[in-house]
Image: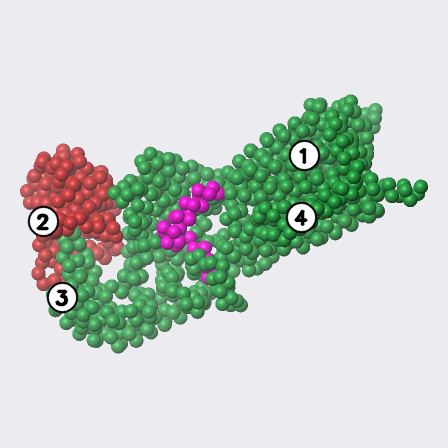
Chain colours: A green, B red
Amino acid sequence: MTRDAHGQMPLWRLISIWSLIFAVLGALTVHGVRNVTTDLRAILPRNETAFAREMDFFARQGAAKLMAIEATVATTDDLDRALQHLRSLQPKLEELGLKSLSTADPHAVVKAAEIIQERVAILTTEADLEALAPELAVGPLTERLRALRVRASRPEDSFAGTFARGDVLGLTGKPALVLQSGLGGSRTDGDLLVHADERHALLVMSVPFDPSEMDRTRPLMYAIDSARDAAAQDAVTLEGIGAYRHFRENLDAVHSDLSASMPLSILLIAILLYSLIPNLRALLVMQLPAVMGMVGSIAAVVITGQALPAAILGFSAAILGVAVDYGQHMVVGLRSGHAQSMRRPLVMAFMTTATAFGVLLTSSVPGLRCIATMVIGGLSMSLVTSLFLVPRLTPVMKPTDPWLVVSRPLLRMTQRFPRANWLIAAGLTAACIPGLMRTHFNDDLRKFDGSHPETWRILGEFERRWGGEYRSSDFLVMIDRDLDHALDRVAATRRALALPPKEIELLLPSRAEQARRLEAWNSFWRKHAAPFAADLEIASRAAGVRFTAFSASLDRYRPLDAAPELTFATWADTPVGKLLAGYVAQTDDGWQVASPLGKLNKSEIRTVGATLASGPVWIASREHIGKHLVEVVQSDLMHRGLAILIAILALVFLIERDWRVVTAQLLPSLLALAWTFGFLGWCGIALTPFAVLAAAFIAGIGIDSAIFLSQNPKAETLSPVLVASITTIAGVASLIFAQHPMIAGMGRVLGVGMVFCLLACLLVTPSLTLFFRRKPAAASA
Amino acid sequence: MPMRLLFVLACCVAAHAADPTLLDRVQAASKDVATVRIPFVQEKKLAILDEPIVSKGLIEISRPLSAVRWEFTGKSILIFNAGKVRRWGAEGKEESAGKNDPGLKSFHDQMQAFLSGDWTGLKSVFDLAPDPDGAPVLTLTPKTKDIGKYINRIVLRFRDDFTAPASMTLTATAGDETVYTFGEPEVGADLPMARFSGP
């Protein structure tokens, strides 16, 4: 390889090589950002079967791929305007591939009606028959026939009389109710549902793509936004309800947070750095480790084949704050002419941080592994850039440090009364310990979500209005190779829990249940058929209708040798089939049957969970997932937190071989952590599991600063430590105001943590280092 | 569906012709009609009742006002106006039209279709057969078995001058029958807004 007079690679070649590296990493970064995922499963652990199956269940649930658009008007007189706006939106959404869940297709409705007519015996439950028995007496029958006469006599009624001839008791009506009524007691109006209050109308459509496919979700939401604006001009409030709205808002929040926080962070950092290094070229060179760190972090995730979750992208900003330190220390070292002495603390700082996050690579939580990969990959690139590129590009500068006006008196102050410093540190620690006891975690998944509060309010009102049936949050679930077996066990579990049957149990009974119902039907009509016929004749005379017209009814109400079998396939291409598809699905492991439970509270979840204990039927609960997620991540971090501590301790001891130096380097980080979480505990701030990860950053940066200060406790060393800490604080502080709660939570913990980290370093490291150095000196004297 | 058919067939038909001559004539005769009043007698023969139910009434249509009034004299009134159907009972009291009443829903749809001139649904549902001897009669039979489960056939007879329908007979599959006999149409009738605001 060609070298110049100093034995170095020519600059043009060096720049070419680094440009190539940057291009490759940049391409990988672009690829990673384009394929960013918002699927929570990408960051959650799958090593627990029960947890994984619940997550898979909700991922499969058809409800996640529904888009509901609700139109609201002020008075019932304006309802038609609401319907009109929904109808004009529908074709636009159909162009995007959405399909109506309508029950209005006459062919589909008639097919379902035929199925019901032919199988009324097995669609009628024992409870239905029990309720029917008193209705067969002459009195109730007479009332029924009189009402029929009135209805059929209305000139605008065309078929009531005709229909009643074949089913005078209306037994086919109950299963058919599902064809006529919508959510929350609503009525259907073509493809739309109209709420009983006649002020709200609803269009529900199935969406052929996942909400995370943002290139398709955005046009969908834009179409709804545009319709909403047009409707608003007409005094109609139109709202899109569903995961697609939440996903867009989450991703917008992440993008907005990053685009808002990054320029501000960079500006603040630039101002601070300029105050330390007033040389434009040197300042630009100083940013190279940060830039390479950023692309390196995302490229590392892509290279290792991991999914890049949107929420974790926020960590790249934190990496920026850490990575910029490396360049800064190197440029300051170059300016003062002792760049070589910077190499050891830089490598040591990297190793401690890499060790801490290296432990997280063993985590069972993919999200934690992803973060660890980002940090190690990003900081590796920063380190290599700082060691090999920055020295070649940094111009020669006068060895002047403008920050000495701050760092000199500050260092004197921290070293003048060491015991006073330690007393302050002890006092702060004592004050924060009760706060640590108050630390708690947020287990409400909604609080990890970046949707607007308005969106949650609208969803809450929507769920209350439509009876909470739009999207049940809890289900009884079973997966089995035999669909019939799964149907039977889920229905039996529902009965065992004393819960009334839902559509899945009523309209898709297992073969065994069909046999039971047929037996009940036959037993009932063996007993009642003859007296019923006699009573119907009496009642017909009393009501003034022809008894002979009901011969088809009498023919229907009799024992049967057999009924046509009813299977999931029977309902294909009918409104009932569409409904059941939300509850029955074929998976790799067999048929999944789900029976909706609505929304259970914590105590109900416990009770149902205890009842199901070891059986094949299990409960899928969104709230349960949230709680479990917190437990798993928390437990994972707690276990690895101890491992991280031991690994760092071992590493620093191996390098320094002196427990006093180890203490000076590690104690500030431990204190900073205790103060940070104690303070947050006092403030009552609930932590997210990923906010705890900030502990690793705080510890890593605390150790970095302490390493520099303990190795050379001079004002010249404190200047870059001060600027490095403050730039890091500037890097993360802007995240505090992020829209996304996960990112804001991280910003809060990191911001507070970095302030305490700097404080702990100032109070402990210089004074402790001086104290330990004086002692051996005094002893030797 | 039935109400829709009744109205569609009785009042216009024009757009979906199996017999271009017949329907062209009907369409030509009615295309310039802005308002029309048609008296009718409805006779329902139901197997469950000994006697037929006879109802007289009027259909009034105003294209300029985009409104339709369907009155069964002494029984009920249905009015389609401003995109909404309202119903009044025999006592003149407004009832809960539009709420869970599929009959009124059908009426609403067909009124809207009539006023907009969009009859595209009819041709896909029925085979339209003109009388082979050239009489002004059109017989409609359901194309699909699902509609065929409810309606056996519909026979529509026009006036000799093709200006309006003369009668319509709807035969249900179980044999129940509804017959509309239309009277002299009053084309250009004075139909003020008040006719479409209530009884």
Q: Quadrant of residue A523?
A: bottom left
Q: Chain of mark 4?
A: A
What residue does disc 1 label? A726
Mark 4 element type? helix
Q: Which mark is residue A427?
A: none
- Whether tag 4 and tag 3 are in contact, CB under 8 A, the answer is no
Visible residue check, residue A222: yes
Q: Say left or right for A489 vs A562.
A: right
The C terminus of chain A - image quarter = top right
**Where is residue A437 shown, x and y percent of the image?**
63, 53
Nearest the eye: A664 or A315: A664
Q: Nearer the viewer, mark 4 or mark 3?
A: 4
Q: Say left or right for A588 vs B112.
A: right
User: In this view, which residue lies farthest toward the right?
Assistant: A781
The amino acid type found where label 1 is placed reads Ile
Q: CA distance from mark 2 to mark 1?
A: 88 Å
Q: CA distance from mark 1 to mark 4?
A: 25 Å
Q: CA distance from mark 3 to mark 2?
A: 25 Å
Span highlighted in magenta in the image: A451-478
Labels 1, 4: one chain: yes
Mark 2 element type? loop
What residue does disc 3 label? A543
